[in-house]
Amino acid sequence: MAYSEKVIDHYEHPRNVGTFDKGDDSVGTGMVGAPACGDVMKLQIKVNPQTGLIEDAKFKTYGCGSAIASSSLVTEWVKGKSLDEALAIKNTHIAQELALPPVKIHCSILAEDAIKAAVDDYKAKASAKVTELSSS
Amino acid sequence: MTPHLPIYLDYGATNPVDPRVAQAMIPWLTEHFGNPASRSHAWGWEAEQAVEKAREEVAQLIGADPREIVWTSGATESNNLAIKGAAHFYQSRGRHIITVKTEHKAVLDTVRELERQGFDATYLDVLPNGLVDLDALTAAIRPDTILISVMFVNNEIGVIQNIPAIGALCREKGIIFHVDAAQATGKVAIDMQTLPIDLMSMASHKTYGPKGIGALYVRRKPRVRLEAQMHGGGHERGMRSGTLPTHQIVGMGEAFRIARLEMDAENARIRQLQQRLLSGLQDIEQIFINGDLEHRVPHNLNISFNYVEGESLIMGVKELAVSSGSACTSASLEPSYVLRALGRSDELAHSSLRMTIGRFTTEQEIDTAIALLRDRVARLRELSPLWEMYKDGIDLSQIQWAAH
């Protein structure tokens, strides 16, 4: 299967590979997919509590070149965005940017799911903290 | 032509035509183009002579009588002719067929087609090493079983089945025994004088001959009958009509002649290369060899690199022409059904690489492959959340994954 130049670029030079401390309150972690399906994406966002903006993002992905490229691209896109702006990133944008063939569309869907999961995780942590503060 | 073609480690998919074979073929395309079925002039006679000489060569490699060799277009057609032909001919005796889950699609889909026609089929599981469990096979035999089909050498994992024992069982029960030997000719010694095989499929292009030609061995003593699947001029004793492609047949004959003469020396050399490849990789953490290492052709090494997805690994080693399964299934996203049949987890089945070595593979190529694989596996594991979790001591089987 021939990959697009952008997929190859992200695959060969993945952006923002790594891991933040999961326990950090400013970090939201999303892990989606399943090994049995051949793709697992872990996306982490680091949010500035003052501005509410995503300051940094990191990923690790087990999957094909398109899955790696989709998650690498997403780490670039979410940086500097608010949570709502990040949630507005759709799989169609990712698929279009990377020129994914139809059999690889699920990789872009997974990347969109990873954003949602990371934002949900951050929000859950933040509201738990608020609850904690108000109850003490 | 593409410049800088990758190192070819996909001999299981196909082989280059040996230059000696190509040389032998050319005159039969240009100067000696006669139809071997033309009995009325010298053009036909010389073509017929060439075809018969090639038939003798194919027969000689497997210790058969030339009259037991039927030309076909390849192993897929041979499998179709053998399985459908025997099932149709012997259906008054019974309608049950046994085969194995790790067979090539050309066997599995043919048996499926017979099921659609009203036959009954059993698809046997294999042992974790890829070999057929003889007790399970014995238990699967019914009074109405007419045909058992088991491949000699597996195309994905290279394991050699215990053909003498399975054949003896078939003889004892009076069941026709078909063997797909596409991956076996020129790799393992085959002697039809002693092997209890009734029908055997062969391909030319896996033994350094041209694509588009193959043969089916059909035993004469005791005689095995087939119903033709291709009708026409009654060529090949009525079993397979169609003008014989002299040049292709000459090529297969020459390829099988070379295989007979050079097989022992070639296998010894290839075994050294396989050992070199294996010892260069085996200390990598969390790798698993798929298929039995002892009952295996030296040409094949199939390894799962845990926590690395196979397709991304293949993309990473673009300097190597390898596959994650058989060429016939590499377009699908499904993990290998052969590895699943061994009981490998989906993850390990998704993480496999098939490397197949052949006549023109060099030590330098093997060393390059080792260095590339070590580097890319390490790089992809740095990218892998599963590897990170494994390193953190997390049991991946205990995690509830969100299916998608």
Image (spheres, rainbow, N blue to C red):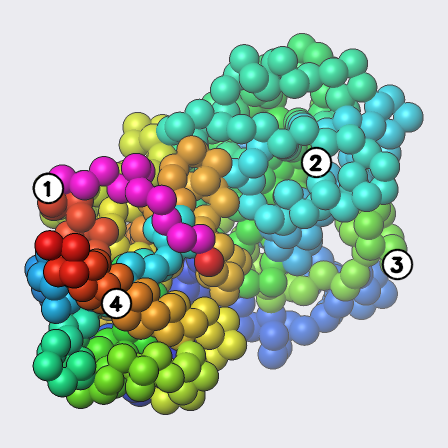
Residue in front for this viewpoint, B385 or B49: B385
Look at label 2 and name its amino acid. Val
Q: Residue at x 12, y 76 (%)?
A: A49
Closer to the camera: disc 3 or disc 4? 4
Q: Kindly indicate the quadrant of the structure image that contains residue B157.
A: top left
**Circle 4 residue:** A123
Q: What residue span does the magenta drawing correspond to?
A: B393-403
Task: Point out the tag, 3 or 1, that comes first from the N-terminus.
Answer: 3
Q: Residue at x 56, y 36 (%)?
A: B101
**Circle 1 residue:** B283
- Horizontal and vertical percent for residue B136? 56, 17
Residues packed near mark 4 inside 10 Å, few (<14), some (14 to 19) or many (20 plus):
some
Disc 3 secondary structure class: loop
Q: Which chain is disc 3 placed on?
A: B
Disc 1 secondary structure class: loop
Look at label 3 and name its amino acid. Gly
**Circle 2 residue:** B218
- In 3D space, how far apart are the residues under numbered discs 3 and 1 (Cα atoms)? 58 Å
Taking the image as drawn, is residue B79 in sight? yes
- Left or right of B122? Residue A43 is left
